Image: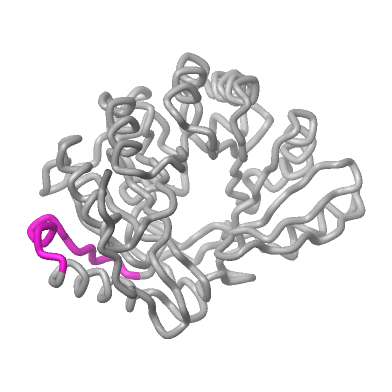
Amino acid sequence: MVILRMVKLEDNLGRRFEKLRISLLNSCNFSCVYCVAENFQNISTDTLRLSTADRPLTPDEFIRLIEAVHRLTGLKSIRLTGGEPLLYSDLFPLINHIQKIGISDIRLTTNAYYLKEKASKLFDAGIKSINISVDAVDQDIFNSISRHPNTARVFSGIEAAVKTGMDVKLNAVIMRGKNDSQIIPLLEYATELGVRIRFLELMKMGHLYHSENGLFFSEKEILAIIQEKYPIESLPRGHAETANYWRASNGGIFGIIANESTPFCHDCNRLRMDSNGFFYGCLSNAHGEKLSEYIDDDFLLTEKLRGLLRLKQPVKFHGSELSMRNIGG
């Protein structure tokens, strides 16, 4: 059992690092339009690996970093992301080691392409909450957004996860002229499955950072489309939630992650680590901090974490050249 030596790591808004999101790898079998620019070349339908000057961490290095941060912050949960985390070969041993550190709330974000075969094993390993990216019900629209010829497997993966008893949430990035027609079909699909869906405003990240963002579709517009068919009522927002939630008259519960329209920076409690061991206190800052050389020095590590905490925006996200493929969803 790890003995925690927590210090008061808190900024002037009372924000702390309570959740760690770990990008296990920057490889993905999808090449979604909001992650990868249109002029990409030679992308395999199985795996895309972005070039990087730093080598990926080994599982042991991941664990040492997690353990050190947990010792000082008392992390409450960890979310494993990618790229696509189900491509990570040491996923299950890593989950086991994280639990041994004393963190039992381990969650996962996936595109669900490989989930049908792995859902039961993930549940048995301790993954009880999973977020799944699904940007359309219509197969042609989904294929065009993901740039993958066979997104049908995603729905098999979703249904397999639901059957295990996991807490399943669906995530859909809504883009003008691409999948705004899918808002009602996605809501109805999620309602039929008995799971929550969250619609995301498009974030200006990666190759979209310097664009005019003509694909942006606002929270107000999403709500207007839903209200045309279903009366809705708002639900209370939980502390540090990224989404605001509503209940529709068909019984479905949906959220909107509106980083532009309804910012949620004021109580953000997330810290991120990429697959090369760089830590990010805020997505608005593209420059990560490598903490590996400080993990045996609690004083210096604490100061580095304080610095990352100070990077958090007081009001709203301002965009970043970081790619979500590298930093995780």
- On the image, which quarter does residue 285 sit in? bottom left
Q: Position of residue 126 (x, y in %)?
A: 45, 30
160 to the left or right of 17: right
- Residue at 61% of width from left, 51% of height from top? 175
In the image, residue 144 sits, relative to residue 243, either above or below, namely: above
220 to the left or right of 240: right
Q: Position of residue 255 (x, y in %)?
A: 69, 53
In the image, residue 36 sits, relative to residue 100, either above or below, namely: below
- Residue at 39% of width from left, 80% of height from top? 11
318 to the left or right of 193: left
Q: Nearer the viewer, residue 45 or 113?
A: 113
Q: Which residues fall within the magenta stretch?
A: 285-298
Query: In the displayed image of the protein, which residue is found farthest to the top?
Result: 117
Q: Is residue 287 magenta?
A: yes
In the image, residue 196 sits, relative to residue 44, either above or below, namely: below
Q: Nearer the viewer, residue 225 or 98?
A: 98
Q: Quadrant of the N terminus?
A: top left
